[in-house]
Amino acid sequence: MKKLVFNTMKRLFFTLTVISLSITFASCNKEEDPGKWIEIELANFWKPKKGDVYIAGRVDTKGATVWKNGFAQLITGANAINSILVSNGNVYMAGSEGGLATLWTNGVAQLLSPIESEAHSVFVSGDDVYVTGSEIDRYSTRARLWKNEVAQELPTGVNGFIVYVSGSDVYALGKIYEYDQFYGWYFYCYVLYKNGIEQYRLHKGSITVNSIFVSNGNVYMAGWDAYYHDYYYDSATLWINEEAQRLSLSRSEARSVIVSGYDVYVTGTEGNVARLWKNGVAQELPEGVQPGFRFYVSGRDEYILSSGMLFKNGIEQNLNTKFYNATSIFVVE
């Protein structure tokens, strides 16, 4: 298998820009020398410790940006940072640079593909680093999985893969089209693969799956299914393995799912309103949270990113900055 990596294009971003920081310092030492404090923070930007909050996003006038506890750094050359994760003392980011899928490790960029592509998410299992993404080859887009920067094979004849890595197991959910003799036309259904072996298929019909999460061997999938009440409309749905659980009886969509302990969180919309369901029950969201918000759980703490604001357990965090166009959040445990 050919390794799609270009070591000559690896480089360390020596110049990282601090974006408009207005900081109130609590101790006398920090008040006396705030410049030194900023310098210390930048020097330790890629040295995560427990409690650090990393956020990826984009400042329109600057470019792809990463924040650590409110301190911002511009990732020079990056088109987008779509996912950020901390593991084994390293900060990993997945995105694109120059229109090519890229993995950053502690600020060091590594291109993953020689053709138009993008990295969507990053997972770490032991010493192995997995990156999911997509490549555009001529007129078609295909899902991609890289393991330790080497492209892996995904099942053929399947479209629109969503990939999740749990431990050493790789789960891939894709769509196939099947002919139904009873109705006399084609339907599509979703097929779940584990390590390349088909596990089961979700029923045919008007369903859409946007996100998967694996916990304790169970596969959680969030999306929507057609619901009929006088007429058909999309209704937010959570699948646990093959069993569907409808989250709303109104027009709604489920966009992502996260499992933490015994709690299952689903984000989405109901009508034009942002919605978070916890164990199937709609939760009250802080004022100002808009559709498309980002959600993260660390222990018993729940984080929400929306409209440049960060909320922790429903309380807005005053970090003296705005997290523009946030795409991902990770809290070091």
Image: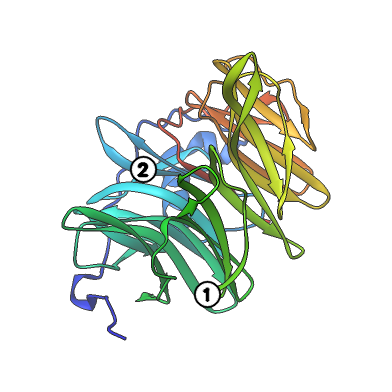
Residue marked by disc 1: 196
Report helix, strand or loop for mark 2. strand
Q: Give the camera-side residue of 37 and 126.
A: 126
Q: How is the image coloured?
A: rainbow
Q: Give the camera-side residue of 265 and 63.
A: 265
Q: Give the camera-side residue of 304 and 180.
A: 180
- Residue 177 spot, x, y in % from top left: 44, 53
Residue 270 at least partly seen = no
Res. 65 mark = 2
Above-or-below relation of 274 to 77: above
Instruction: Look at 47% across and 69% down and name the residue there.
Output: 130
Above-or-below relation of 160 to 148: above
Above-or-below relation of 264 to 44: above
Crowding at dot 2, Cα within 10 Å, few <14 / some 14-19 / many 20+, comes out as many
Residue 28 at least partly seen = yes
The nearer-to-camera label among 1 and 2 is 1
Labelled pair 1, 2 in contact (Cβ < 8 Å): no
- Residue 60 spot, x, y in % from top left: 28, 30
Report helix, strand or loop for mark 1. loop
Instruction: Look at 64% across and 13% down and name the residue there.
Output: 230
Instruction: Look at 71% across and 55% down and name the residue there.
Output: 241
Q: Which of the marked residues, 1 or 2, is nearer the chain's N terminus? A: 2
The amino acid type found where label 1 is placed reads Gly
Q: Residue furthest right?
A: 262
Residue 267 falls in which quadrant of the image?
A: top right
Q: Residue furthest left?
A: 138
The amino acid type found where label 2 is placed reads Thr
